Structures are given as C-alpha cells and as structure tokens.
Amino acid sequence: MQHLLSSWPQFSGRLKSQKLLLCLDYDGTLTPIVATPGDAVFSEAGRQVLTSLVSLPGILVSVVSGRGVADVKNRVGVGGILYSGNHGLEADGPRASWVHPESWLLRKRMAPLAASLRRGMSAFRGVIVEDKGLTVSVHYRNAEPRELPRAQKVFYKLVDRAVKMGHCVIRQGRKVWEIHPPFDWGKDAFVSKLYHEEAARQGFNLIPIYFGDDRTDEGAFRVVAGRGIAVKVGSSNGNSQALYFLKEPREVLECLRKIRGLRVA
Ligand SMILES: [Mg+2]
C-alpha cells in the first residue's frame, strides 16, 4: 500500500480536471475513533473544507456511514452532500432521498431484536446497543476486558434465532458487532449504484474516490479500486482492497484541502 499524500503528484493532473465522486466514511475517517460513538464530533476545519468542496463544479461529495442517516447528516452539518446511512441502506441528499425497498421489513425485524439486546446486554458495563432502525450496532469498546468473552456469548445467544431464521447476519466492525440485513446490500452496493447513476449523468470519465477505515468499507474499496482511488485510513497493514492509505483523519482533511486547491487554482 502506498501513502496517498506521498504519491500525490501522480494524481494531481487527473484530480484537477476530471469530474469526481468523493465518498467518505465518517467514524475513523472524518473524525478520530472515540471511546463513545456519541462523542465523535466533526471539526470546524473539516466542515469548512467540505463546504468549499461541495460548492465547486464537477464534484459530488457523499458521506457513507454505518450510522443512521439523520445522525450522520446532523453531525457533519454541511448542505449539498449526499448522505448515506445504515451502510448504504438509506440516503438523503441534494437530489432525492432513498431507502432500500426492503427497509419496511427490516424495521419490523430489527425493533424487537434491538429491544432484547438492550435488555440482555445491559448486564455488561460499557456495552452500548445502538438501534439505528434498519441495523443495530453493539459497541463493546468500553466493556470490561474480562467480561468480554461472556458478553460475546450472550450477544450471540440473543441473535441466534434471528440469524438462523435468516432475518439478519452479524458483521464484525472495529470493536462493534453489527446486525445487518440478510441480503447482499452494503456500502459497496450503495457506492456502486451511486457511481453508475452519476457516471450516466456526468459521463464515464468520472473518478470515484473512497476513504474508509473499517472492514465494512472493504467492499466499497473494491468497487472504486479499478476505476478510481481507494484509500484506507489508519494503517498500511493488513489485507485491504485499497491500494492507498492515510494515517489518520487529519491526513484525510489535508488531502481534501489539496483537492480543493487543485480545483480552484
Ligand atoms: Mg469508519
């Protein structure tokens, strides 16, 4: 994997002149990972650079998060961005809002599951159950390390029936168990849909760029890798579909400033 900022000269020509689809994850990408997800506050500096990017012609900015769409929209707080929440199951943006056609069924199934997890996991200090309507996240970053094996056992017991009935699947994120829909739809499918819609509108020389830090971003890396730039935030280690990396969210903002600099020059 190459460091994106160090490889910058090889991209600057294309990034200066071609149309861009700029996709960004939120937690761990635009903001540093924090102990409690509710505390992940977007910086004013970040808000400024996104605000100036969305005002430029030929750039569509999309924030693609595992959070609920209203939550991520509220946290970023910049108009003109296409926000997607629940790992691509819903979107809200300048042109239209969208939800996955099966979301009514998901809502119906996730609600009792979230309620039972909230009850069952309340025995473990530091474990947070986040009901996002279409998916549920169980964060264990702040759990007592010695209680973790038992918390994991209880978690899998509580979701076992729903998993066996084919109502959901479990995905592992960064210190979080994610309860996802059983069908194949995630950030990858959303980014692919978005890319094809935008390319049909703007022309197929559109360059997709995706910044993300987590396993749930890997599919989206694969979608953009052949056509644009996939950037893993956090580390150059480990198996990733991304060919480029940045060390931390601060470098993501630096990169966004460089893109803005190229486009206004
Ligand atoms: Mg993330």
Image (cartoon, grey):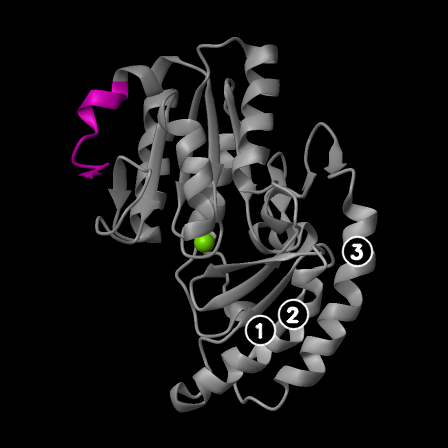
Point out which mark residue 156 bears. Answer: 1
Q: What residue is disc 3 on?
A: 107
Image quadrant containing the C terminus: top left
Neighbours of disc 2 within 10 Å: few (<14), some (14-19), many (20+): some
Is 2 colored magenta in this rendering? yes
Q: Which mark is residue 90?
A: none
Which residue is under mark 2? Answer: 159
The residues tagged by marks 1 and 2 sit, at their Cα atoms, a distance apart of 5 Å
Between the C-alphas of marks 3 and 1, the distance is: 20 Å
What residue span does the magenta drawing correspond to? 1-12
Q: CA distance from mark 3 to mark 2?
A: 16 Å
The percent coordinates of residue 262 (x first, y second) are 32, 23
Mark 3: which secondary structure?
Answer: helix
Say which of marks 3 and 1 sits in front: 1
Q: Amino acid at mark 3?
A: Arg
Q: Amino acid at mark 2?
A: Val
Q: Quadrant of the N terminus?
A: top left
Label 3 or label 2, whichever comes before in sequence order: 3
Looking at the picture, how far across and down is residue 192, in whole percent? 54, 28
Name of the residue lying farthest toward the left: 6
Left or right side of 147 for 242: left
Q: Is residue 105 above or below residue 38?
A: above
As for residue 145 lying within the magenta part, the answer is: no
Query: Quick check: marks 3 and 1 in contact, CB under 8 Å?
Result: no
Question: Do the CB atoms of the residues marked 3 and 2 lie less than 8 Å apart?
Answer: no
Residue that appears at 44% across and 48% down: 46
Looking at the image, which residue is at 29% across and 53% down? 234
Residue 104 percent location from the top left of the image: 83, 48
Q: As shown in the figure, which amino acid type bears the numbered disc 1?
A: Tyr
